[in-house]
Image: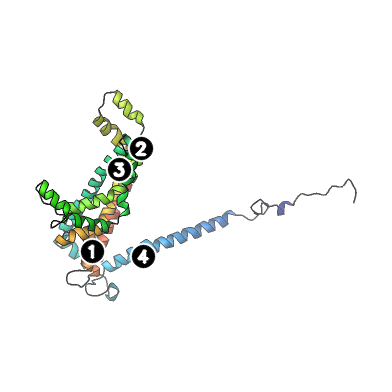
Amino acid sequence: MQSGTQLSTRVPPASRADSNGDDLGSDRPRKPRRDRVLVAVNIAIGALLTYLVVFPLGMLVYSSLKDAELKLPFQVPGYTLDNFARILTGQRLFEVALNTLIFVVGTVVFALVVSVILAYLFERTDLPGRRILAPSTLAPMAVPATVMAVAWVLAANPTNGPIALLVQSVLGFPVDIYSLPGMILVAGIFGVPGMYIMIAPTFARLNLEFEEAAATAGAGWWTRTRKVVLPLTVPSISAASMLLIVIALEEFSIPAILGLPDQIFVFSSLIQNALQPPSGIANYGQASAYGVLLVLLSLARTLHGLCR
């Protein structure tokens, strides 16, 4: 070997590799491989959603088209619209629809008013102790709706509930938790934490310069709140209200515990009544038809909110 000869240490282009071990000089395309992985992931997600959502909804629609008053839906041949015809022509539909409307609107209005007031006090004022009071707003989230309904039955039932007896003795009018106002009160309290979580950050991010400019122009507190603060929070308030409407439509435990003793039905509790009627014979077809109508109501409200 000649002394002036230098050994080349360069690696041939075809064998060069990066720090991750990938062949940089290879002519094999890597993008199709990533595309195949993404397609496989999308297929897996689609299959999971189909199993969790589409399949149960398909079974609900299938059962609603069966005249399965005394049998399981799979034991009944053929298809029929009799379940929907009986519901739409029955006398109970209007009453249940009205109860559902009052319950949902009352729950949303109650929770919205309380949430907006709390969000304003905790995020826009120097209320003493607000750093401790604000987290306590989320306390109802730690209590299941069933437990909360039972607790209010014990506290405000018209027979021996201490709250009902106190209001009766002090204010002179009776309190009955087994009523639509009672259902709205408990469901509204249960809905406050979720609405507060969605609304409070908007109040916290509002620019104080807008209010200061309005105050400089001579606007009072109510005018500033009505014309400056609330319009800026409309998007978050609308989103929180839309979510709570769907939740209230599907709420079962509170209407069942507080409404069934006085036969006050909403759509969700009426489904349970069709599955466990006083006769003891479940009507799966009618219960499924009520379920389809409830799904359509929730879907229509959701689509209406998304299209606004």
- Amino acid type assigned to the residue bearing label 2 in the image: Ala
Secondary element at image label 2:
helix
Q: Earlier in the sequence, mark 3 or mark 1?
A: 3
Q: Position of residue 21 (x, y in %)?
A: 65, 54
Label 1 close to label 2 by CB (< 8 Å): no
Q: Which residue is mark 2?
A: 204
Q: Position of residue 203 (x, y in %)?
A: 33, 38
Disc 4 versus disc 3: nearer the observer: 3
Residue furthest to the right in view is 2
Disc 1 versus disc 4: nearer the observer: 1
Which of 130 and 214 lies nearest the eye of the viewer? Answer: 130
Which of 187 and 51 lies nearest the eye of the viewer? Answer: 187
Disc 2 versus disc 4: nearer the observer: 2
Disc 2 versus disc 3: nearer the observer: 2
For residue 55, the mark is 4
In the rendered view of the protein, which quadrant contains the C terminus?
A: top left
Q: Position of residue 298 (x, y in %)?
A: 28, 55
Q: Earlier in the sequence, mark 4 or mark 3?
A: 4
The answer to whether residue 230 of the structure is visible from this angle is: yes
Pointer 3: residues within 10 angstroms few (<14), some, or many (20+)? Answer: many
Q: Which residue is mark 3?
A: 237
Separation of disc 2 and disc 4 at Cα?
A: 42 Å
Separation of disc 2 and disc 3 at Cα?
A: 14 Å
Q: Reply above or below: 123 against 274.
A: above
Residue furthest to the top in view is 217
Question: Residue at left 18%, top 53%?
Answer: 182
For residue 271, the mark is 1
Separation of disc 4 and disc 3 at Cα?
A: 33 Å
Which of 177 and 162 lies nearest the eye of the viewer? Answer: 162
Say left or right for 216 vs 6. left
Disc 1 versus disc 2: nearer the observer: 2
